[in-house]
Amino acid sequence: MVSPGILLVDKPAGMTSHDVVARTRRAFGTRKVGHAGTLDPMATGLLVIGIEGATRLLTYIVGADKTYEATIRLGQTTGTDDAEGEILATAEPEAWSAVTDAAVEDGILALTGEISQVPSSVSAIKVDGRRAYDRVRAGEEVVLAARDVVVSRFEVAARRQRDGFLDLDVIVECSSGTYIRSLARDLGASLGVGGHLTALRRTRVGPFEVSDAVGLDALEGARTLTPAAAAGRILPVLDVSAEEARDLRHGKRLLDQAGRLDGAGANTAAVDPDGVLVGIVEKRGADLKSAMNMPEGDR
């Protein structure tokens, strides 16, 4: 029997997130595998994988903030806002006179904090039931609605002038749903020379770090985080008695007369005396109600 757990995988370039899920299914001998947030084939880095009953935890991970390391090429625009797209325009030499260090810093500052961002047309966002990138590949013109995101850090780590372009190595910390390709596009547009992404690596998803991840060649026998350990990283933890655990698993509410959840978040991980995750509970008036139960027998 396959034990449920959360697996951290370092995705290589050239593979889809679905490819990684397929490899994990084969390595662990189960079909019940999912991930908490897609990475483009060009991108590398952290994929948070759920196995068996732990896939139920992915809902609580997918919205976590993230950290990326990326390279933005200023001076060229592509149809996909990254290096895989067709080159649409290249900046003329005279356009570079306005691209000073101060102008770059101002452009980055304008894209930091709470911003409204139009996702790339080749994103995985669904439009009338179909992925935007599928519609683009079918020849349709797709313009997605702007969305509010938070970029808490947008920092230049290095810069290189080469072949008539300016490459910026950047570190971005942002809310879920932020498109780094769109940051590259919008920075280039604000400077008047265009821009796109040439490299992208996700190094963090919430409390999970790529430094703790395994490569695809190490999937066989890879250690996973137990559901309780993973839930404890992303949510407050409530220790429940064996009787309370049984009641929660049977769909009963628990009285919270002692105020054990006062000050806790909207969701809390309930863990039984054996250290097993019972599920996720939420406060409803004076009671505790199960918002998600782990399958019984999953440890």
Image (cartoon, helix red, strand yellow):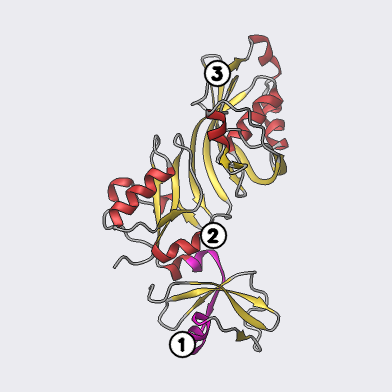
**Is 293 situated above or below 286?**
above
In the figure, residue 193 lies in which quadrant? top right
Which residue is at the front of the view, 158 or 287?
A: 287
Dot 1 lies on which element?
Answer: helix
Q: Position of residue 84 (x, y in %)?
A: 49, 26
> Between marks 2 and 3, how big is the CA–CA gap?
37 Å
Q: Is residue 145 magenta?
A: no
Q: Earlier in the sequence, mark 1 or mark 3?
A: 3
Q: Earlier in the sequence, mark 2 or mark 3?
A: 2
Name the residue that disc number 2 marks. Answer: 59
Q: Position of residue 217 (x, y in %)?
A: 28, 46
Q: Are marks 1 and 3 in contact (CB under 8 Å)?
A: no
In the picture, the quarter occupied by the N terminus is bottom left
Name the residue that disc number 1 marks. Answer: 242
Q: Position of residue 3 (x, y in %)?
A: 34, 67
In the picture, the quarter occupied by the C terminus is bottom left
Q: Residue at x 56, y 67 (%)?
A: 235
**Is 240 situated above or below 205?**
below
Kind of residue at disc 1: Ala
> Between marks 2 and 1, how big is the CA–CA gap?
26 Å
Residue count near mark 1 (Cα–Cα under 10 Å), binned few <14, some 14–19, many ≥20: few
Q: Which residues are magenta?
A: 231-250
Q: Earlier in the sequence, mark 2 or mark 1?
A: 2
Name the residue that disc number 3 marks. Answer: 87
